[in-house]
Image: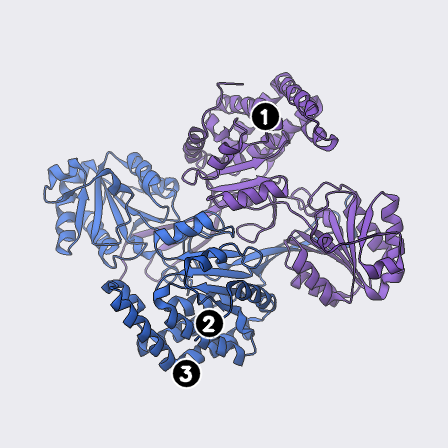
Chain colours: A purple, B blue
Amino acid sequence: MSGTFNSTDEICRKAKEASRSLALFTADRKNRALLCAAEAIKEHTEDILKANEDDMVKAKASGMNKGLLDRLYLDKKRVMSMAEGILQVAELKDPVGEIIESFVRPNGLMISKKKVPMGVCGIIYEARPNVTADAFAICFKSGNACVLKGGSAAVNSNAAIASAIKEGLSKAEADPNSLGFIEDTDRESTVELMKKKEYIDVLIPRGSASLIETVVNNSVIPVIETGTGNCHIFVDSSADLDEAREIIVNAKTQRVGVCNACESLLIHRDIAEKAIPSIYKALSERGVEIFADKEALSICPDMSEAGPEDWGREYLDYKISLKIVSGIDEAIAHINKYSTGHSESIITENEENGERFLNEVDSACVYVNASTRFTDGGEFGFGAEIGISTQKLHARGPMGLKELTSYKYIIRGNGQIRP
Amino acid sequence: MSGTFNSTDEICRKAKEASRSLALFTADRKNRALLCAAEAIKEHTEDILKANEDDMVKAKASGMNKGLLDRLYLDKKRVMSMAEGILQVAELKDPVGEIIESFVRPNGLMISKKKVPMGVCGIIYEARPNVTADAFAICFKSGNACVLKGGSAAVNSNAAIASAIKEGLSKAEADPNSLGFIEDTDRESTVELMKKKEYIDVLIPRGSASLIETVVNNSVIPVIETGTGNCHIFVDSSADLDEAREIIVNAKTQRVGVCNACESLLIHRDIAEKAIPSIYKALSERGVEIFADKEALSICPDMSEAGPEDWGREYLDYKISLKIVSGIDEAIAHINKYSTGHSESIITENEENGERFLNEVDSACVYVNASTRFTDGGEFGFGAEIGISTQKLHARGPMGLKELTSYKYIIRGNGQIRP
């Protein structure tokens, strides 16, 4: 792959140039390019698999754990599904060009607010090669060039995928620099990328909490913070306990390594004696360790004891914290103190408490009587997702194509000057 | 004033607490509090004027220039107009609570996207005391608590205004900590403020380019960059030259110290000989010095010569740069290279060129045949403005109440779990 890619500065500058023409592409033209990119990935399956094999050999030798190895691993089916993913994005509605609002001022100025691409999106991610194809497709369809910087463990796989996509773009007569790929995987080039404010309009880190923190602390480019989820479920005194148990089991165990998994349970004191033993049984049968406060332990001594640090933890594992609360006020206050602002759910048959929870819990997604696992672009019907924002600036919750656009004001006059 | 205000950490924490209840206020309740705040400012006019006198004495002694002294100075009329400004904000439509969209998923989940306040807005500004009242009012009406940190030169005036507003809030039974005022004016407390991510949701710097750069480079809180404007006017070959001259004179001289003033002229080569002498005459009559490229100088040698650094300059003064270009392509490329992304205008009778300019110039506000001076919340009909964003994330161009809101997803289920 060497020789295919350039310096960070050059990649960013060329991506900015490419973004100028890409912003003017029709949906059809973007879709044709996405088709060619998907086709090129299919054609280069063998190259991609060979590159992935190199990454896998190194990763195994370095002692990478099983979960991460599985994320890194590609086979024919996974490569095909990457290409299919690009085709699915091509089918989505193009958000660019929509006139959001239009008004005429008393002086005759006609003002329109028009949806436009962000420009260049920088994506910093870890060892999941499929992000290379996914992130490119969603950026491209929303009219954005992208600059991608993946983790070092996946560098060969990522480079092979990026090369194939660039070839596809060239075939479709789209600028291959619409995908900027940074091959250097050292920390210096990441720091350099985070300073390229003249070329990059928004930076989206995807990965661990520590990666995200590094980007937030060092970037001079506006950042969208994604994906840290200390998600809570509050079981109110009026909850249907069978429903509560099913939702809790689903939210904790359906997939444990994800940001919308439940990490903390709050149980209303009035139903604690009835609820906790059955929740304990259901979770422990699935191998989940519960870290509970003293009061809950007195009801069910088989659980582990929680330390104060447990309330703020995102375990991403078969672990969950549990605390007894005096009611909805304490539940809301606890969540607003410890949550990362991702997703929280109340299980209740009391409509008033449900509404209070929805209004007063300050998180991106707030649920009544459903699993937190639904916080997802696909589950929301967005068709594709670049991440889940836990900040309030720009976008909140699952981010699809629309969330990768900005707007501009277009003003048509006939000689107006300001008095 | 000493003793009234607390440490930066405490102020931020209390503002966050206050924001929880404020987010649930009805428009009526917010309006009543704004009325009381305006009333309290009127009642404390004498205190505010006395505090301002202290600031003015120190500022004069320190040799502050006339323009800045005028921005700092308050008299009865200016204090009244501050109070009137708060009342005007009370009259604006409350953006909070609007359901932006609503949809039902195949599994029965009902998802609503609801407009909510940001939470706490941090505003860092310089020596304009009226910002204290303006920023508070616009944050409060959009359901946000604010933490204000003004420049040291205005600290007594700002503190007196903040005290009056807090008194008004208390009278209206709103939490006076909805306005957090940081009295310390040293650099350390600014740096501290920029790290209070747990309490502050967005940071908006208002002031000089260097203040804004400091905030962008040091904040870990999401920032909205405002107000740097290297605004261009391109006079196309088909322009009505009388109209062009009037617009240029207005955009440059109607007020020179503002971000939407024109700083750079691009003149189509085909009309340069005709246009430049009359533009030169009109501008120089108003005391404007023109920094022109060599080709333009050969047409009109009385202008000054531009250096390469002139193309990127925001003079904020009776100065402007001027360059001859070969046509719309060069004009667009030049603007996209040197502009700060604020406001640009084309003067043309050619509709196609007008549309190309609107589509291809990558700035917040793009005009055909009008002065750039219209980029302003008031002129756009927003009623109030917290600043003009030059970034693409979250908000672009003039920011009113709506731009100080975020949204949340509210999801109502009846036991849904993810398969």
- Visible residue check, residue A224: yes
Count neighbours of disc 2 (C-alpha within 10 A) and say few if under 14, some if 14 to 19, many if 20 or more.
Answer: few
> In this orientation, which residue lies closer to the viewer: A9 or B348?
A9
For mark 3, name the chain: B
Residue type at tag 1:
Val
Can you tell which of label 2 and label 3 is closer to the viewer?
3
Q: Tell me the residue that label 3 is attached to.
A: B43
> In this orientation, which residue lies closer to the viewer: A156 or B184?
B184
Residue type at tag 3:
Glu
Residue type at tag 2:
Glu
For mark 2, name the chain: B
Q: Secondary structure at mark 1?
A: helix
Q: CA distance from mark 2 to mark 3?
A: 21 Å
Count neighbours of disc 1 (C-alpha within 10 A) and say few if under 14, some if 14 to 19, many if 20 or more.
Answer: many
The answer to whether residue A8 is above or below residue B191 is: above
Q: Secondary structure at mark 2?
A: helix
Callout 2 touching callout 3 (CB < 8 Å): no
Q: Tell me the residue that label 2 is attached to.
A: B91
The answer to whether residue B356 is above or below residue B37 is: above
Q: In the figure, residue A42 lies in which quadrant?
A: top right
Residue B177, image x and y in percent? 54, 70
Q: Tell me the residue that label 1 is attached to.
A: A155
- Which residue is at a point 85% across and 63% down the rendered structure image? A271
> In this orientation, which residue lies closer to the viewer: B342 or B310?
B310
Quadrant (top left, top right, bottom left, bottom right) of the C terminus of chain A: bottom left
